[in-house]
Image (cartoon, grey):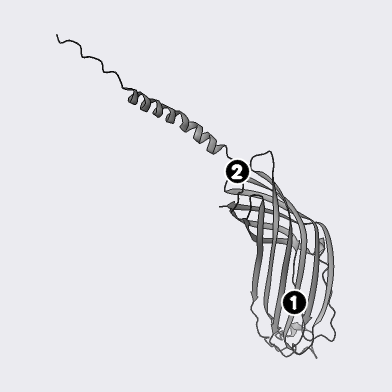
């Protein structure tokens, strides 16, 4: 039999390396927990992009037929009865941890092709009976273009709550909205192009809440405690006529309720 081999004792250097390895392995779970425990939410130089749906003023003035003997212009009051759902997009930049610069808006363009009148065989001056075999007249369909857009900007101050990922904010907004309808009817009874336009200028105080589901995904709700809107509408029924216009002032409480969903990056 061979004598047993002598046991080699580890050096102090080897012992220290083993201890260091054990400490690293023990610290890894703690590092992961610390990373996961970081608060969800915005920080300085973060950017956000959100889709918004709001119940707010609509801005449009329809063009009027150019063959009327007189015209009147009822100006919208921009109150709750004149509002509608409006979809838009909003971007934000946190220039400080608690302060965000906001820019948003939306646009809509609609085209209605026009068609020329088709004369029939019926003589409206002598006959009103369409059962005599006469072919009725088809009136011209107006060629119409609609344009609507709105833009706004503002600054928000964010307030962290005790709930992770939940933030309150308050701020101010200024905005501009515009609507235009151009109508052209190709027949002998209308006098070419008719135009309707409207715009408003708006200032508001705003407040809301945002909840970060993850660090990069959030939902929110917002309302304006107070808002002022100046609106102006005008029409030009025929080429060469001066504008017929009117304006209004509106003061609103709890205006423009809005919901949004967005991303932070």
- Residue at x-position 71% and y-position 75%: 180
Vertical order, 253 against 192 (above or below): above
**For this view, does 246 lie left or right of residue 49?**
right
- Counting from the top left corner in percent of width and height, residue 33 is at 53, 34
Q: Residues within 10 Å of mark 2 (few under 14, many from 20)?
A: many
Q: Residues within 10 Å of mark 1 (few under 14, many from 20)?
A: many
* Most distant residue in the front direction: 12
Given residues 45 and 186, the one toward you in this image is: 45
Image quadrant in which you'd find residue 117: bottom right
Q: Is residue 108 visible?
A: yes
Vertical order, 128 against 46 (above or below): below
Vertical order, 29 against 201 (above or below): above
Instruction: Please give the label number shown on residue 197.
Output: 1
- Counting from the top left corner in percent of width and height, residue 205 is at 77, 57
- Residue at x-position 64% and y-position 43%: 165
Which badge, 1 or 2, comes first in the chain's sequence? 2
Q: Which residue is mark 2?
A: 40
Instruction: Please give the label number shown on residue 153.
Output: none
Separation of residues labelled 1 and 2 (CA atoms): 45 Å
Given residues 144 and 123, the one toward you in this image is: 144
- Counting from the top left corner in percent of width and height, residue 141 is at 69, 81
Q: In the image, which is nearer the foreground, mark 1 or mark 2?
A: 2
- Residue at x-position 80% and y-position 66%: 229
Image quadrant in which you'd find residue 93: bottom right
Given residues 122 and 247, the one toward you in this image is: 247
- Counting from the top left corner in percent of width and height, residue 47 is at 59, 55
Q: Are marks 1 and 2 in contact (CB under 8 Å)?
A: no
Image quadrant in which you'd find residue 245: bottom right
At mark 1, the secondary structure is strand
């Amino acid at each position: 039999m061979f004598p047993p081999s002598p046991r080699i004792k580890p050096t102090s250097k080897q012992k220290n390396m083993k201890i260091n390895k054990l400490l690293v392995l023990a610290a890894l779970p703690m590092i992961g927990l610390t990373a996961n425990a970081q608060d969800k939410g915005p920080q300085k130089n973060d950017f956000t992009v959100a889709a918004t749906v709001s119940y707010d003023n609509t801005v449009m003035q329809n063009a009027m037929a150019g063959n009327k003997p007189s015209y009147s212009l009822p100006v919208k009051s921009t109150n709750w009865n004149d509002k509608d759902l409006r979809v838009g997009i909003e971007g934000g930049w946190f220039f400080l941890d608690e302060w965000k610069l906001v820019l948003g808006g939306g646009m809509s363009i609609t085209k209605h092709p026009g068609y020329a009148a088709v004369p029939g065989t019926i003589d409206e001056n002598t006959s009103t009976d369409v059962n005599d075999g006469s072919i009725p007249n088809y009136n011209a369909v107006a060629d119409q273009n609609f344009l609507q857009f709105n833009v706004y900007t503002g600054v928000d101050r964010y307030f962290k709550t005790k709930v992770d990922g939940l933030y309150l904010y308050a701020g101010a907004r200024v905005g501009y909205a515009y609507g235009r309808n151009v109508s052209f009817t190709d027949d002998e009874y209308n006098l070419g192009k008719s135009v309707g336009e409207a715009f408003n200028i708006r200032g508001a105080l705003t407040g809301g809440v945002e909840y970060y589901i993850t660090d990069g995904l959030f939902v929110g709700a917002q309302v304006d405690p107070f808002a002022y809107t100046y609106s102006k509408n005008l029409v030009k029924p025929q080429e060469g006529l001066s504008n017929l216009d009117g304006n209004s002032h509106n003061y609103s409480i709890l205006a423009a309720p809005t919901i949004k969903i967005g991303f932070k990056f």
